[in-house]
Image (cartoon, helix red, strand yellow):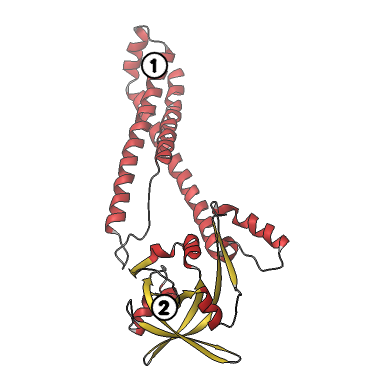
Amino acid sequence: MAGVSPMVSGSGLALRGEASQAIALMGVELDRYDRVVGLRSKVVSGSARLAPGEAVIGRELAQDLGVRVGDRLTVQTGSVSGSVSDSVRVTALVDLGVKDLNRRTVIVPLRAAQSLLALPGGATQLDLTLKDVWVAQALARELQSQFPYKIESWQESNAQLVSALNAQSVSTSIIRGVVLAVVVLGIASVLVVSVVQKGREIGILRAMGATRGQVLRVFLVQGAVVGALGSVLGLLLAVALIWVFTHFVRGSDGLPLFSIALPLPMALQIALIASVCGVLAAVAPAQAIRM
């Protein structure tokens, strides 16, 4: 487990002069919450601080209320005993990646939210972050068996997203398999044609004492060279496309839409697979030589 962050959350209103906006109020301990979601990395203006009387709000909410860093706004919540309000100063604007979240998020200190939502000393949820995100499901089941609370992993909270990712992974694997088969057949067909066209040269080599195994190895080496050259050119093209995409395809905030990287181990694995496929593609021409 990498971090735990208690949170108090609820609904309320953000007021600034005559303007008002429905909000999702969250009370957190900033350092703990930052270890879970990386809040400081999402700051687009100001500096994230949550001292008493301070707040961090979404970028779109600030635009709707006409608020800038350093301005004050009023946070109001309702309860059975009446409404409770508190004036806070905005220390930072954040971009959470979703406009709807940016339009209704107000983050205040944990104690301030406990007072506004009438939960002194309490918390509505605990957020956990793990070093290995794929063990979240197993950990959720283990905690569920130990505690009488509602415990959800990120897979359960985002079931539709997980299903979409799984479907995308399966379709991507199928496309890769089909492309790999087409490439192998293409190399094999070129080498078979080469064997047919160079039948006279092969006959001369045989007459000069070359064995079938030696001629066979020539075509196997040719297949390996084609696969190796193809893998190198493919990797160079991939690096170029990644550079173009990350430098020219950007969102409205000027940042890249996606963070794309090509790890060296993956590049080496791809090059090895391409070279092996080139050798396998040369098996058909080699069999033609044997006949």
| Mark 2 residue type | Arg
Looking at the image, residue 235 lies above or below residue 52: above
**Identity of the residue drawn at 43% across and 14% down:** 212
Res 121 seen here: yes
Q: Dot 2: within a 10 Å radius of its alpha carbon, few (fewer than 14), some, or many (20 or more) residues?
A: many
Determine whether label 2 and label 1 are within 8 Å by CB. Answer: no
User: To which quarter of the image does residue 200 belong?
Assistant: top left
User: To which quarter of the image does residue 159 belong?
Assistant: bottom right
Q: Nearer the viewer, residue 158 or 184?
A: 158
Q: Nearer the viewer, residue 38 or 187?
A: 38
Q: Which residue is mark 2?
A: 103
Q: Nearer the viewer, residue 1 or 269?
A: 1
Identify the element where label 2 is drawn. helix
Image coordinates of residue 229 in percent, x first then y, are 33, 33
**Identity of the residue drawn at 37% across and 19% down:** 218
User: Relative to residue 80, is residue 226 drawn left or right?
Assistant: left
Image coordinates of residue 287 in percent, x first then y, are 46, 23
User: Relative to residue 81, is residue 229 drawn left or right?
Assistant: left
The quarter in which the N terminus is drawn is bottom right
As drawn, the residue found furthest toward the front would be 52
Q: Nearer the viewer, residue 282 or 285?
A: 282
User: Which numbered circle lies on residue 78?
Assistant: none
Identify the element where label 1 is drawn. helix
User: Which numbered circle lies on residue 215?
Assistant: 1
Res 291 seen here: no
Image coordinates of residue 274 in percent, x first then y, are 41, 35
Q: Nearer the viewer, mark 2 or mark 1?
A: 2
User: To which quarter of the image does residue 269 belong?
Assistant: top left
Looking at the image, residue 212 lies above or below residue 53: above
Image coordinates of residue 10 in percent, x first then y, are 54, 79
The Cα–Cα distance between marks 2 and 1, rounded to whole angstroms, is 71 Å
